[in-house]
Image (tube, helix red, strand yellow):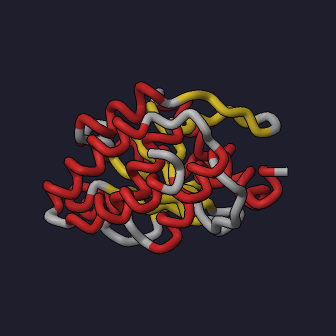
Amino acid sequence: MRQNKIKHLFNPLEALLKFLSALGVKNVIIGGIAASLLGKTRFTADIDGLIFLSDKELENFLKKAGNYGLLPRIKNVLEFVQKNRVILLKHKDSGINIDLSLGLIPFEFEVLNHAHPFKIGNIVLYLPTPEDLIIMKAVAHRPQDLEDIRSILEVNLNIDFKRIKYWVKEFAKVLEMPEIFDDLKKLISHAGG
């Protein structure tokens, strides 16, 4: 069963989702959890999310996180977030790390708008579409990300390759990393894209 490889993440995931819901923060769960639920299941040690929060809301967000057992992993967390657009938290009870990227660019807003609910036990989380996760994984471009793309392509048959190619090509140009698009083309050619 897909959930078994992420069972150790249920409590911190539930705490995170309750916290985000209480504050009305829009979110999408990405990373290894999304890859396991949209592709072939694999072990993941942490929780990754994409959230939408204004700079004015950051301080209040960080203050209230502790009420849900979510603590900053670093000192000067507010300064780090403002510079890097990533909130680094740890679930107090389990020690599980949580990385929350702050959405900013048009693609990330599209990810939010395309997200769909997914229920695991008593938890309902929002996941990106397979296409959007493939795009994010292609841009991250680590070996595990490329494996996740293969897995997602094997499990999902109705993929919008045009969308994937468009966004990955755009990111490759902006980042001046043509290999991102070149490697993606190789992966999707095996899946009929």
Image position, residue 106 (x, y; %): 24, 35
For the point 49% across and 60% down, the residue is 89
Q: Is residue 175 above or below residue 61?
A: below
Q: For this view, does 74 lie left or right of residue 58?
A: right
For the point 61% across and 56% down, the residue is 151
Q: Is residue 192 above or below residue 31?
A: above
How many marks do you count on the picture? 0
Q: Is residue 29 above or below residue 21?
A: below
Q: For this view, does 190 lie left or right of residue 93?
A: left
Image position, residue 176 (x, y; %): 14, 64
Image position, residue 128 (x, y; %): 50, 38
Image position, residue 6 (x, y; %): 73, 57
Viewer-proximal residue among 35 and 57:
35
The quadrant in which residue 109 appears is: top left
Q: For this view, does 57 lie left or right of residue 21?
A: left
Pick the quarter of the image with the C terminus.
top left
Q: Is residue 81 visible?
A: yes
Q: Is residue 15 visible?
A: no
For the point 64% across and 68% down, the residue is 45
Q: Residue furthest right?
A: 1
For the point 66% across and 46% down, the residue is 155
Q: Is residue 9 above or below residue 146?
A: above
